[in-house]
Amino acid sequence: MLERTLSIIKPDAVSKKLIGSIVSRFETAGLKVVGIKMQTLSKEEAGQFYSVHREQPFFENLISFMSSGPTVAITLEGEDAVAKNRALMGATDPQKADQGTIRADFAESIDANAVHGSDSPENAAIEIPFFFRSLDLCF
Ligand code: ATP
Ligand code: MG
């Protein structure tokens, strides 16, 4: 199924100069970049983006981290893009992520875990417009 998904390269990975390495993994896996945008989120924006987690004990920490520096939001398109991106990312906790995944190779901790990826096509359809107007996406 041809899908779109949202990836975010998080502040830890941007500050470690990993943008190119991470985008290269997406492209090598056959995912196409159809939108890309760099920005530093405010705490409010990060909180809105991760609002499903607002009751979680880690919420404050998560939004402080996500607003701590520049991020790169990317819309990816391809066959089974949501699952393919999640497989490339690896588990939330880098200690538990499979070898060769982005989080195993580049992430420090469950907080600073290098990338975000939509977890379903339904959430991708909500998350992509959070960052991109439809006119900003290329075909
Ligand atoms: P993301 O949504 O960032 O792609 P994910 O889908 O793998 O990550 P979620 O359960 O959606 O994981 O959690 C969102 C983010 O909240 C995680 O990336 C992580 O940084 C943080 N987080 C999740 N669970 C914990 C936890 N138990 N302790 C600390 N931070 C956590
Ligand atoms: Mg998630």
Image (cartoon, helix red, strand yellow):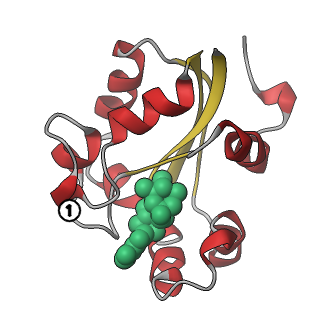
Mark 1 element type: loop
Residue at the disc numbered 1: 108
Using a 10 Å C-alpha cutoff, classify the residue at mark 1 as few (fewer than 14 neighbours), some (14 to 19) or many (20 or more). Answer: some
Q: Is residue 133 visible?
A: yes
91 over 6 or under it: above or below: below
Picture coordinates of residue 97 (x, y %)? 22, 49
Which residue appears at 67% of the width and 36% of the height? Answer: 121
Picture coordinates of residue 9 (x, y %)? 44, 47
Q: Which image quadrant: the C terminus? A: top right
78 over 134 or under it: above or below: above
Picture coordinates of residue 122 (x, y %)? 73, 42
Q: Describe residue 121's horizontal placement relative to residue 134 as left or right.
A: left
Q: Describe residue 2's horizontal placement relative to residue 12 as left or right.
A: right
109 over 24 or under it: above or below: below
Q: Write down the quadrant of residue 94 in the picture.
A: bottom left
Q: Is mark 1 within 8 Å of ligand 1?
A: no
Closer to the camera in the image, 41 or 62: 62
Q: Describe residue 125's horizontal placement relative to residue 56 as left or right.
A: right
36 over 43 or under it: above or below: above
Picture coordinates of residue 133 (x, y %)? 84, 37
Which residue appears at 62% of the width and 77% of the height? Answer: 43
- The kind of residue tagged 1 is Glu
Which residue appears at 68% of the width and 41% of the height? Answer: 124
Q: Is residue 17 visible?
A: no
Q: Describe residue 107's horizontal placement relative to residue 129 as left or right.
A: left
Q: Write down the quadrant of residue 23 in the picture.
A: top left
